Image (cartoon, helix red, strand yellow):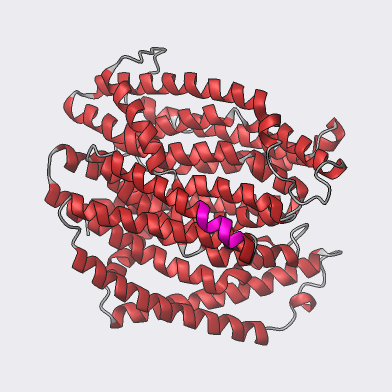
Amino acid sequence: MSERLAKSAGTIGLAVMTSRLLGLVRDQVMAGLFGTGMAQDAFQIANRIPNLVRDLFAEGAMSAAFVPTFTRYLKNEGKEAAWRLGNLVINALLVVTTVLVVLGIIYAEPLLSLLPDFGGSDPAGADGAARLALTVQLARIVMPFLTLVAVAVALGGMLNSLRRFFIPALSPAIYNVGVLFSAVAIVPFCEGWGLHKIVGIAIGALIGGLGQILVQVPLLYRQGFRYRPILSFSDPGLKEILLLMGPGTLGLAAAQVNVVVNTYLAVGEGEGAVSALAFAFRLMYLPIGLFGVSVATAALPEVARQAAAGALDDMRRTVSSSLRLMLMLSVPATVGLMVLGGPIVEFIFQRGQFTSESTRLTAMALLFYAPGLIGYSAVKIASPTFYALNDPRTPVLVSVSSIVMNLVLNLTLVRILSFQGLALGTAIAALFNSGLLVYLLSRRIHGLEGRRIAVASAKILAASLAMGAAAMVTESWLNASLPDMQGWISWLPGTWGATAAQTLRAGLRVAGAISVGVGVLGLSASVLRLQEFTAARARVLGLIRRRR
């Protein structure tokens, strides 16, 4: 396994872990403040489009179009030409996204009016009107996030091309800091200002978006970049990137478009369905960010350089090692989420307005979402590789077919399984998307060390199933054996004692099950001589030692 790839993936994983953990804290705060009720649903719907663009740019179009082109300019034409290209991209994004923001603000109400009523019994009545009014207000507030995140991602793309991975991977954490700041410093005052409390969270999203830019600028300037207000849509480099961005966005859009489809269909499945799907998707996306995105971000510059040099043998080894590392990390995570979903949701979210019913709804969605984790992670590696090979057509066609498949599945399954069917359809479509992409990529570069990947996959699955069985048995035993913790912390006032006791008990169940499960995973990997586990463990331990 590539030493540089593993080291870079570990560095990115550390930064992404920080961001994802802060994201969990953010979600905990929002769950406690708003539960899975109307305000939470309204924010999730309003924030869906800005988040769609963020996901597409951060993990899609920029990875597929900008990073390979910028890397080639650095290699072949030098830093000055690359800086000029970076300025052209930033300014083009400013123009395009500003237009989109203005249109979004103007047409927010007529567009959102197309949605079915999300939970009210009378779409034309007071409940439906209040939901629509709040969602429109929130959508107009968060819309400028499009521009902020586009610029932030362009800066991060340049830093990634320069092999400066940590700060760009850490920058999303600043978004979470902005939301958390607003929860403490703005939300408590909103009602006094005549605003709904959730409006404070929307303002925090903008603060976080601006912070994502500011945290990257100093490092980029130290690399020699200087902002210039230049724009030329006729520039060959910019034209190449813009031409690739359309296919690049479509090629990686399946996951994000499918989430938008889920949001639309879930609106009609009762109050709380939208929020439950959103919380479950973000829990599933935690390991994707830690494993899939970090491995892909580290691999892409190497793949781009190997493609530019025509070194297909090296590219095969890099892609194969990336896929095996991804599987070693994501398959156990998938099994863990499926068998421990309920206790995990209870431990992380169940307090305040997030009730046991909210936990039940979110855990059911997570159970069906979890298998898609493997597919989402693999796409992060496979799809950008096609763009490095100057083949945007293949991932676009595969992505479109995946979107169509997801739509058909969801329209069918939502009638059978309600909102859980939406999660299941999305997971199936993600696995289809990734499987077809990897197969076509293997044909494109004449192999991907297929036998090695197949053997590793079988061993990883066997070890993961053993881990899952051990974790499930352990959690069940702990749930039956652990006493009520309220007597231990009876000194806490009011309902705090009961909440703390419930959280502590759930935490002990989760920690005990994970500890036993990881131990069984390690033992199984040793028995099966799973080299990928040994390599991943060595990299993680080495990273921990370097960070001390």
Choose between 455 and 228: the one closer to the eye.
455
The magenta stretch spans residue 413: yes
Q: Position of residue 514 (x, y in %)?
A: 51, 74
Q: Can residue 548 be seen at all in this image of the molecule? A: no
Image mark count: 0
Q: Which image quadrant for residue 228?
A: top left
Look at 36% across and 52% down and name the residue there.
Answer: 379
Residue sitting nearer the eye, 214 or 364: 364
Q: Is residue 200 above or below residue 240?
A: below
Drawn side of residue 548 relative to residue 340, left or right: left
Range covered by the magenta-colored residues: 407-414
Q: Position of residue 511 (x, y in %)?
A: 56, 73
Q: Out of 139 and 290, give the one closest to the viewer.
A: 139
> Toward which corner of the image does residue 540 lie, by quadrant?
bottom left
Does residue 133 appear in the picture of this structure?
yes
> Is 56 included in the stretch rendered in magenta?
no
Can you give x and y, in whole percent of width and height, for residue 378 in the image? Answer: 36, 55
- The chief SS type of the magenta part is helix
State the image coordinates of residue 377 (x, y, percent, origin top left): 39, 55
As drawn, 147 above or below 526: above
Relative placement, left or right, of 173 versus 383 is right
Q: Looking at the image, which residue is at 23% across and 44% down?
A: 302
In this rendering, the answer to whether 343 lies above or below 112 is below
Nearest the viewer among 151 and 503 is 151
Quadrant placement of the C terminus: bottom left
